[in-house]
Structure formats: structure tokens, C-alpha cells
Amino acid sequence: MSRLKNKVAVITGGNSGIGFGIAQEFKNEGAKGVIVGRNQETLNSSVAQLGDNFIAINADVTNLANLERVFKEASEKFGKIDVVVANAGGGTIGTVADIGEADYDKTMDLNLKSVYFTVQKALPYMNDGGSIILIGSNAAHRAHASFTLYGAAKAAVIFFAKAFSSDLLDRKIRANVITPGTTDTPAFEKFVPAEQIEGLKTHFASVMPTGRIGQPSDIGKTAVFLASDDSSFMLGAELLVDGGMTYLAK
């Protein structure tokens, strides 16, 4: 499989979960490039699995100087960049009655500001005709309890795919967004005690039209499509990869 042979990719949040799933599928299709994250331990273990064609850069995607450094180092190592995956995200969950200004800023910086400036800082180092892949969430479409800010930020990310594509028409750089649903990642560990994780996954699987939750590879395979020439006629599009949850779940 070589749909991405010799393409250079930068994947934020590429050291775990969905981001690492994307990096693995890119590797399988012949890509090379950079995974970005803040946890040096998982960066080391993930890049070891990806092999010699990938490097890891420790950086905070909410820090513009860090982003400048990421793309400069990536370009110096691999040359011009073909694919940027703005995957890093997360943040505080809670209701409008609970979340104060500090958590508001943290959540919006990580899920929205970081996406905007990841793309902006990448542009001087990208090849014309490249692909930008954003990661949304079906929380943008369904009002899940306590995901108020996260869902709002991801709704804006979905719009960014349209607007970035419009902004970059003259360079033929396409921006599209993948919208996952519940996916089997280490994020579960942040929200519930370890002994409850498997039960929660079983619950989510029971309400998914597919009868299972997503795997990082499900998102990774979709990202390969958007990074490759197979999707050359797509720009500003949203691909729901959520097991039917948004439109078919009861």
C-alpha cells in the first residue's frame, strides 16, 4: 500500500489515541513525517513503533512559538510538508453553570485556537496542492451532557474546513474535517475511574448503530483517504466517522 508514498505529514497529538492511529495508517501507506505531543514518554514509545521515517517533537500546540518550531524543524528534516493533521484537543467538561473563565480559555485554546494557528504556522512550509485534515467531534452535532464548550469548539472547527479551503483556493490546498464519535482511546482514563472504563465502553457500544465503538484505525483510514489524491475533488467537507451515532442513534 503506497497511497502516501514520500508524502510528508505533521500530526499534532500524534503520540496517542486517534492521532497515533492516523500516524500508523500514514506509515502503512508510505508517508513520513512528524508526530507532535507534550508527553515525552508516549512520544518516545509511539515514534519507536512508527520507525525511522518519523520523528517526534515535544511541543504545546497552544503556544505559537512552539508551533513555529514544529514546522521549521519538520521542514528542515523532511522538506516541504504535504499533509497537516490538526488533531490535538481535549479540555474540561462541564455545564454552563460550572465552567469558569480559566477553564473556558483552556478548552477553547486547545480545541480552537490551536487548530487555527497550527494551520497558519504550517502554510509557509506546505506544498501547494497539499491537504489539511481537521478533527471534529459528533459533540458538535449532539448536545451531550457537560460537553458544552468542547462541542461548540468542534462546531467551529467543522466550519474552519470550509473557510480554510476558501482562503487557500489559490494554492490548491484542501481542508477537510473528520468527525469521530466515541472512540477507544486513553481519553476514557481522564473521565472515569479505571475500574469503570470497560463498563462505559460496553454501554457506548450498546447504543451505537454499528454495535461497537470506534477504533483509532477507523479514523486513520479515513485520514489516509483525505491525505491522498483519491480525495482530490473534496474540499471543505465533513466526513462523519461515528458509527452512525449522529444520524441513526435513537
Image: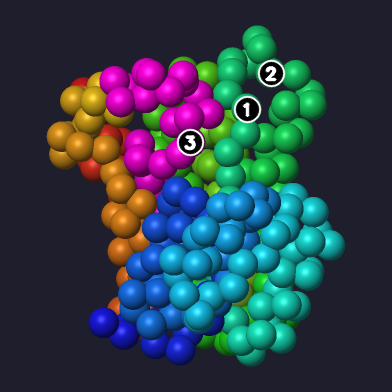
- Amino acid at dot 3: Ala
**Residue at 64% over, 89% down:** 79
2 or 3: mark nearer the eye: 3
Looking at marks 2 and 3 on the same chain, the residue that comes earlier in the sequence is marked by 2
Q: As displayed, is residue 79 above or below residue 44?
A: below
Look at the numbered discs 2 and 1 and tell me whether their residues touch, using CB distance below 8 Å.
yes
Horizontal placement of 205 versus 166: left or right? left
Using the rendered image of the protein, determine whether residue 217 is visible from the camera's viewpoint: yes
Horizontal placement of 180 versus 9: left or right? left
Q: Is residue 182 magenta?
A: yes
Looking at marks 2 and 1 on the same chain, the residue that comes earlier in the sequence is marked by 1
Neighbor class of circle 2 (other Cα within 10 Å; few <14, some 14-19, many 20+) is some
Disc sitting over residue 99 in the figure: 2
Using the numbered discs, state the Cα–Cα distance from disc 3 to disc 1 in whole angstroms.
12 Å
- Residue extent of the magenta highlight: 178-200
- Amino acid at dot 1: Thr
Using the numbered discs, state the Cα–Cα distance from disc 2 to disc 1 in whole angstroms.
8 Å
Tag 3 residue: 187
Q: Secondary structure at mark 1?
A: loop
* Image quadrant where residue 64 sits: bottom right
2 or 1: mark nearer the eye: 1
**Residue at 52% over, 41% down:** 155
Q: Secondary structure at mark 2?
A: loop
**Residue at 22% over, 30% down:** 205
Question: Where's the N terminus, which quadrant?
Answer: bottom left
Look at the numbered discs 2 and 3 and tell me whether their residues touch, using CB distance below 8 Å.
no
Q: Residue furthest top?
A: 97
x and y, in percent, of residue 149 in the image:
60, 29
Tag 1 residue: 92
- Amino acid at dot 2: Ile
Using the rendered image of the protein, determine whether residue 120 is visible from the camera's viewpoint: no
Q: As displayed, is residue 158 above or below residue 148?
A: below
